[in-house]
Amino acid sequence: MTLHDLWIPDISVFEKIIRPILVYGFLVVALRLGGKRELGQITGFDLVVLLMLSNAVQNAIIGSDNSVAGGLIGATALLVTNYLVVRLAYRYPRIERLVEGRPTLLLLDGQIKTENLARELITEGEFRTVLRRQGFEDLAEIKAAILETSGSLTVERATDLPTPIEAELLQRLERIEQQLQRSHPLA
């Protein structure tokens, strides 16, 4: 390998810029169609798929060029494309909805929305596991549970029920009040 091979791309700079932009567009669409679940709950299987996906598109991005400059041009094209998409999505809500999608209501007033779980390919068992991890044993404790576009789950507690911490604090305050009444009956 010569210095020329190291720094001078084998293909045109234009092609080095277009290739990553095309692959970026494909991956955005493919991941969007894959659903929010894939973004928020990466399992070992999902990680393997993502690693294989990156390897599969590598040649589409770099072509036959292995030069440092070619790699830097491709990486820069990816970063600039991502920056522009993020800026456009911020400025134009329609683009954001197109790229990100919309949040999905999975539970309302303690009732699971099974059709929405099915659309997101989440089993009821997986959903209940995530809720338990967030401290919700009883579905009646929940006003709403929303699968965000990022794949994370936002859970809104029913307002008429105290949180576990609030319930514990109320019990402690009640015990303190009882002790005070016993020690100072006239107060």
Image (tube, grey):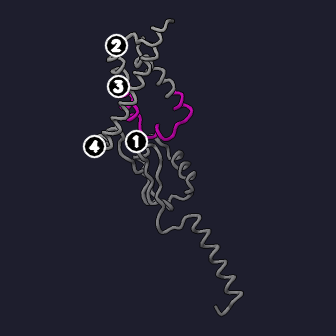
Say whether residue 123 is left or right of residue 101: right
Nearest to N terminus: mark 4 or mark 2: 2
Give the residue number, with chain letter if any, for mark 4.
92
- Hey, what amino acid is under mark 3? Ile
Residue 21 is marked as 3
Q: Does residue 85 sit above or below 114 in this rendering?
A: above
In space, the residues marked 1 and 3 are separated at their CA atoms by 30 Å
Residue 119 is marked as 1
Q: Are marks 4 and 2 in contact (CB under 8 Å)?
A: no
Question: Please, what is the dominant secondary structure of the magenta stretch?
Answer: helix
Q: Quadrant of residue 31?
A: top left
Label 2 or label 1, whichever lies nearer to me, is 2
Q: Does residue 67 sit above or below 101 in this rendering?
A: above
Residue 140 x/y as whole percent:
50, 61
- Hey, what amino acid is under mark 4? Tyr
Q: What are the residue bounds of the magenta stretch?
A: 23-48
Say whether residue 94 is left or right of residue 73: left
